[in-house]
């Protein structure tokens, strides 16, 4: 069974989002997504300073099976990305909700967060898929 | 690997004179000759023969094994096609020879164009694209040229269903278009409502594979064509799966404006080796002026000649130095002449029959079809989602274990839409005995998975290499030999 922490918000396309104390939002891919992809060999994260629209293609994760786009759950400016992934993409497999985070965004419209799924709703989607 | 690199057989001064181009070397002026040896292996003729024969025996190939690699159409290519394409008159013809001395070759190419028009239902064909990717590029470039010629500059969006062939989004991007994805329904057909939502004044066209990579025929294709045309867009047919419908249904009749065909797939050239190929394109009325050149034309007096920019001033231009890969085109020509119209239909009939036989038998043995309510086209998908969950044995484990049974694995984990999938395409050239042997192997592996999952997960056991580390292979590419490694 995949791990779906109850304190995060989710997208149907298997990204998670977490609001930090400073109001920025950290984004990654879910445990279910990393399992489905298999061992990652390459991760491309967005440049700091890039402006993303909600739903825009933000990052790319490539595994031994497939390359997949990662979408931004919210509009705003990228304020940080996880540079460690360049040399160690396996962090996403090992710790998708921690060391394997992808990028952090400063939301331009925090109200958009309310449109994301909670853990229960996302869990139902995963259950349907698996 | 049990076979060392040929460099490891090397000893200084050893040589095989049989193929040494002594005369050619003597003709190279002294100042142009290299000062240091080229670092080539130095082996005897027998060592070279044994080395490469042994290497060839380590491979799976269509000449030695059943190769049901879905979406790839790994079928047998009759030797006769190659033999006739290698007649001295063809081999010795210089591409710059005058038309008057090339009438035989040009006649074959003209007839090939005519036969391909007939089999696709198109109005014009150009043989010049040298591979599938170039054929796709030519197709979308023509769609763009068509809109530009009409002053319709806003049309820069190419719609690609998620069940399309994987290369389509790349092609659209290469042509400067934006890719708009539309989803499939649970039954494998395109979601028409989603399609209608994305159609509009920016639509340049749609790229479709039919049958799709889900192994099913898009049943509402005529409706799709109507909607796209009404929105002002054009329809591109990816010929990846043409084998399934050869001589039965024609893309032109479905409403497509442009098709590309991989001759190195359906028409008697082996593929998967990196070429050479032929990605010929066919077009309907609207795109005729934009076909890539050269094309072979026939004048009123029956003489064949090259048609170039003077004949087609609106052409998208040239894609290769001369006209495609002549050898591949000739093999396709011979193959089509050997099959004839009736034979062409039998290709599709047997390809489809074999796929449906495999599907029905595997289903009866306890495998789950991904689209249980659909008939297979020339290929079909089974999903091992249930086995992965209950037994911990994945599609990859099945694929690896099949190698021990003497079968090349089907396509795994593609299409991405279906979890733990095997995409299986038997093609028309396999016998029932071979299909039955494959089914028996699949059943044997399923029993193993139920009783001893570790055994399946440890496969393969009988091949020159065991389970590879996919991650290391992707991250630490080491394919170049350096002198340092020789120990010399």
Image (cartoon, coloured by chain):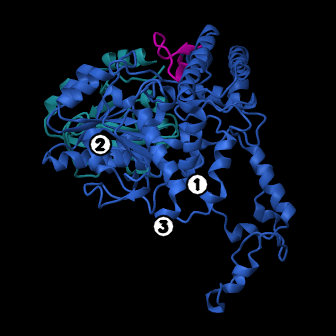
Chain colours: A cyan, B blue
Q: Residue at x 34, y 45 (%)?
A: B139
Image position, residue A42 (x, y; %): 46, 46
Q: Earlier in the sequence, mark 1 or mark 3?
A: 3
Q: Rate crowding at label 2 as few (under 14), some (14 to 19) or many (20 or more) other CA atoms within 10 Å.
A: many
Residue B481 horizontal side relative to residue A105, left or right: right
Q: Nearer the viewer, residue B300 or B357?
A: B300
Visible in this render: residue A96?
Answer: no
Camera-near label (2 vs 3) is 3
Residue at mark 1: B477
Q: Tell me the CA gap for discs 2 and 3.
A: 55 Å
The chain under label 3 reads: B
Q: Are marks 1 and 3 on the same chain?
A: yes
- What's drawn in magenta, residue-wise? B367-385
Visible in this render: residue B68?
Answer: yes
Q: Quadrant of the C terminus of chain B?
A: bottom right
How many numbered marks have been drawn onto this rendered protein structure?
3
B205 is higher (above) or lower (below) than B212: below
Q: Rate crowding at label 1 as few (under 14), some (14 to 19) or many (20 or more) other CA atoms within 10 Å.
A: few
Q: Secondary structure at mark 3?
A: loop
The chain under label 1 reads: B
- Numbered circle sitting on residue A58: 2
Residue at mark 3: B98
């Amino acid at each position: 069974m995949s791990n779906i922490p109850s304190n995060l918000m989710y997208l149907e396309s298997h990204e998670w989002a977490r609001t930090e104390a400073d109001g920025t939002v950290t984004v990654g891919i879910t445990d279910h997504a990393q399992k489905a992809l298999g061992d990652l060999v390459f991760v491309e994260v967005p440049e700091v300073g890039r402006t993303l629209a909600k739903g825009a293609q933000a990052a790319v994760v490539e595994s031994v099976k497939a390359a997949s786009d990662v979408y931004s759950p919210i509009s705003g400016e990228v304020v940080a990305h996880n540079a460690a992934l360049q040399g160690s993409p396996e962090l996403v497999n090992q710790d998708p909700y921690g060391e394997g985070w992808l990028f952090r965004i400063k939301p331009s419209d925090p109200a958009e967060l309310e449109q994301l799924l909670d853990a229960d709703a996302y869990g139902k989607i995963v259950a349907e898929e698996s | 690997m049990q076979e060392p690199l040929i460099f490891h057989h090397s000893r200084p001064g050893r040589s095989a004179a049989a193929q040494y181009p002594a005369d050619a070397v003597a003709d190279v002026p002294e100042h142009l000759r290299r000062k240091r040896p080229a670092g080539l292996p130095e082996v005897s003729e027998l060592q070279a023969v044994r080395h490469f024969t042994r290497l060839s025996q380590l491979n799976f190939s269509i000449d030695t094994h059943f190769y049901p690699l879905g979406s790839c159409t790994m079928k047998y290519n009759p030797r006769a096609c190659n033999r006739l394409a290698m007649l001295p008159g063809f081999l010795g013809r210089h591409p710059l020879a005058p038309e008057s001395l090339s009438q035989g070759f040009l006649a074959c190419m003209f007839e090939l164009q005519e036969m391909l028009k007939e089999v696709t239902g198109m109005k014009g064909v150009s043989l010049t694209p040298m591979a599938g990717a170039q054929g796709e590029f030519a197709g979308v470039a023509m769609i763009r040229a068509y809109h530009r010629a009409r002053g319709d500059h806003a049309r820069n969006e190419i719609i690609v269903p998620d069940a399309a062939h994987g290369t389509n989004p790349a092609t659209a991007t290469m042509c400067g278009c934006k890719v708009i994805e539309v989803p499939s329904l649970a039954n494998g057909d395109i979601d028409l409502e989603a399609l209608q939502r994305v159609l509009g004044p920016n639509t340049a066209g749609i790229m479709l594979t039919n049958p799709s990579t889900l192994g099913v025929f898009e049943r509402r294709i005529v409706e799709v064509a109507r909607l796209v045309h009404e929105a002002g867009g054009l329809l591109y047919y990816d010929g990846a799966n043409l084998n399934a419908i050869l001589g039965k249904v024609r893309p032109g009749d479905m409403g497509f404006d442009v098709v590309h065909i991989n001759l190195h797939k359906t028409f008697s050239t082996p593929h998967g080796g990196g070429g050479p190929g032929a990605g010929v394109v066919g077009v309907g009325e609207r795109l005729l002026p934009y076909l890539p050149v050269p094309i072979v034309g026939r004048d009123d007096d029956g003489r064949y000649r090259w048609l170039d920019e003077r004949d087609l001033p609106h052409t998208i231009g040239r894609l290769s130095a001369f006209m495609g890969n002549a050898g591949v085109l000739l093999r396709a020509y011979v193959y089509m002449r050997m099959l004839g119209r009736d034979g062409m239909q039998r290709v599709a009939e047997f390809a489809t029959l074999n796929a449906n036989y495999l599907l029905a038998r595997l289903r009866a043995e306890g495998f789950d079809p991904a689209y249980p309510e659909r008939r297979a086209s020339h290929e079909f998908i089974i999903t091992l989602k249930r086995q992965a969950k209950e037994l911990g044995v994945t599609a990859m484990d099945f694929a690896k274990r099949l190698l021990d049974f003497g079968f090349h694995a089907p396509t795994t984990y593609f299409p991405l839409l279906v979890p733990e999938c095997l995409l299986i395409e038997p093609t028309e050239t396999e016998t029932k005995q071979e299909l039955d042997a494959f089914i028996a192997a699949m059943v044997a592996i399923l029993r193993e998975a139920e009783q001893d999952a570790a055994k399946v997960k440890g496969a393969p056991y009988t091949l020159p290499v065991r389970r590879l580390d996919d991650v290391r292979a992707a991250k630490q590419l080491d394919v170049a030999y350096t002198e340092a490694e020789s120990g010399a």
